[in-house]
Image: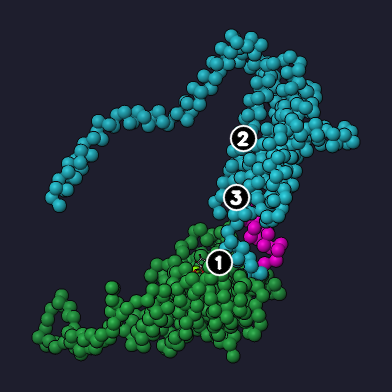
Amino acid sequence: MRDSTVPTAISASAVAVTPTPAKLPSSNRVAFAKFDWLLLPLVGIAAVVGLWFALSATLSKDLPNPIKTWEASKPYILEPLAKRGELDQGILRFTWLSLILVAKGYLMALVVGTPLGFVLGLSKTMTKALDPIIQVLRPVSPLAWLPLGMVLFLGAGRQASELAALFTIAICAMWPTVLTTAVGVRAIPQDYLNVAKVLKLSRWNTLTKVMIPATLPYMFTGFRLSLGIAWLVIVAAEMLTGRPGVGGFLWQQYNALVYEQIILCILTIGVVGFILDRLMSVVERRFKTI
Amino acid sequence: MSFLELNQVSKSYGSTEVLSNINLRISEGEFVAIVGYSGAGKTTLMSLFAGLIQPDTGTVTLAGQRMAGPGPDRGLVFQNYSLLPWLTVFENVKLAVDQVFPGKTEMERIKHTEKFVAMVNLRSAREKLPSELSGGMRQRVSVARTLAMNPKVLLLDEPLSALDALTRSTLRDEIARIWQESRMTVVLVTNDPDEAILLADRVIPLTRGPSATLVSGIDIHLPRPRDRRFLNENAEFKMCRNQVVTSLLAAGAKPKTTITRDLVLPDIQPEDISTPRLSSNRRGPTRARERRREEVEIIP
Ligand SMILES: Nc1ncnc2c1ncn2[C@@H]1O[C@H](COP(=O)(O)OP(=O)(O)OP(=O)(O)O)[C@@H](O)[C@H]1O
Ligand SMILES: [Mg+2]
């Protein structure tokens, strides 16, 4: 007993003494930590811009340097809503056109993907029948789907390119929704289904009052992943169909040997994708709380 | 005439027989408690009553009719509450009410729901989600949801096991009160002999699994309401408990060697020495010598 109390007393006094010398550096640390959310990203950006300067000056002489890029992009950024021609519009106008196309294709993906996910989750037979097909189709690139879409909608005349683009977005963006919804349906606790059974809920009520609410958190994870893919696909779809939009503009400028706006388009696509993902994860988190 | 009846029922999961040759007759308005070991197959037995699973052999009948599937006439209070986490207390109960009384108007159904939420003392929590409730409150919602369906048989699967001792006794008294008011047929499953004796008209031990089966029941004639505080020293209560425990132990897989011997308790009354002793109330020990039978287990 005695032996054990003595060291405790010593260590207790040691703890009481140490904080005083440690105080100064720690308060500096706090001041730094307050701004590092701003400071560190700025350092990162500066490093990348520096690298960009260096690259355009040495290895790839055709790459416009940051200043030239800014000069050439200015009209598109400072007049974001201008419309000078079909393929010469302000950057927000292009973004808006792309977003509309993505929204249409994404909705199609959800409308087809969610029920398909439910069917796969509910029926072992359907899973066995469809899973190999899904696993084969899932990794196919949008660049491969688009020509098929063009062929499919050849008869649609002027609408063909839009329909082909929508088809490509929908079929590429669908898979995360299908797969996570199926996982969610399989993960519905047996208890909830027992409640539905004891209450003798009809099939429709079991679906709408028990199964869909229980699957919602999974579904929204799928929706978020699908939106990310839909936005990825838009560039490819616009490039190949020549539709106006961020991706179409990028491809057109490349073909016209005007390289300055390519980086503007890349940044726009990145920023918009980032914002979409943030928005979706806010929505997703709301459903996660249940 | 028996109301709820199990005839030669057995149920296996895979190659293990969980329940074997279960025979049980329950009359209308009776409160029956089934006491069994953990994992003996109590929930399985309840699922058979509720019609969630079908027996491999034998029959389950309610009022002479063979049960084909689950239905709201047998209200099951699940062991783990099974509330829908995205619905509030009120909505959880209302879901059941909407389903069971489609003929009533919306106003009547809301009234009915409110009545049962109030019955389990949850009016102040009616807009809360299950995740915001304590275990005891969740269990009460589950009881309210089931009672609101106005079932012919109330099936309670260990309704008190997950609760702390204090909440347990409050909720136990609530169940006793609700039963006295409604007099519906109740089957309670529990692993606590005291709880069974305090609530039921008849206690039936379930032997240790696998192949668990019911042994002969013990009728409890204690007057109601049964107050735990007074019953602890009640001779009949002690006898009932002894019978239940003995038959549960006898039914256990491991045979035990015990001897019974007489134990004479000395005639001394414990005294509170913190109170000053006045010569006026200086009396001798008040408790008379007592003889008890004591059972001692022999560990070889
Ligand atoms: N769906 C199932 N599939 C396979 N085995 C099961 C299933 N349900 C229960 N069992 C088995 O049946 C036996 C009895 O389970 P049951 O849940 O009925 O026990 P219990 O008496 O309710 O236990 P507890 O007191 O812990 O609730 C256990 O050994 C369990 O492993
Ligand atoms: Mg159980």
> Is A169 placed above or below B81 here?
above
**Front tag of 1 and 3:** 1
Horizontal side of residue A43 vs A180, given as left or right: left
**Residue, disc 2:** A275
Question: According to the rendering, which colour does chain B have?
Answer: green
A142 and A281: which is toward the camera: A142
Magenta stretch in the rendered image: A201-217
For the residues labelled 1 and 3, the Cα–Cα distance comes to: 37 Å
* Residue A203 shown in magenta: yes
Please tell me whether mark 3 sits on a helix, a strand or a loop. Answer: helix
Residue sitting at x 67%, y 75%: B68
**Residue, disc 1:** B15
> Disc 3: which chain?
A
* Residue B251 shown in magenta: no
Please tell me whether mark 2 sits on a helix, a strand or a loop. Answer: helix
**Residue, disc 3:** A217
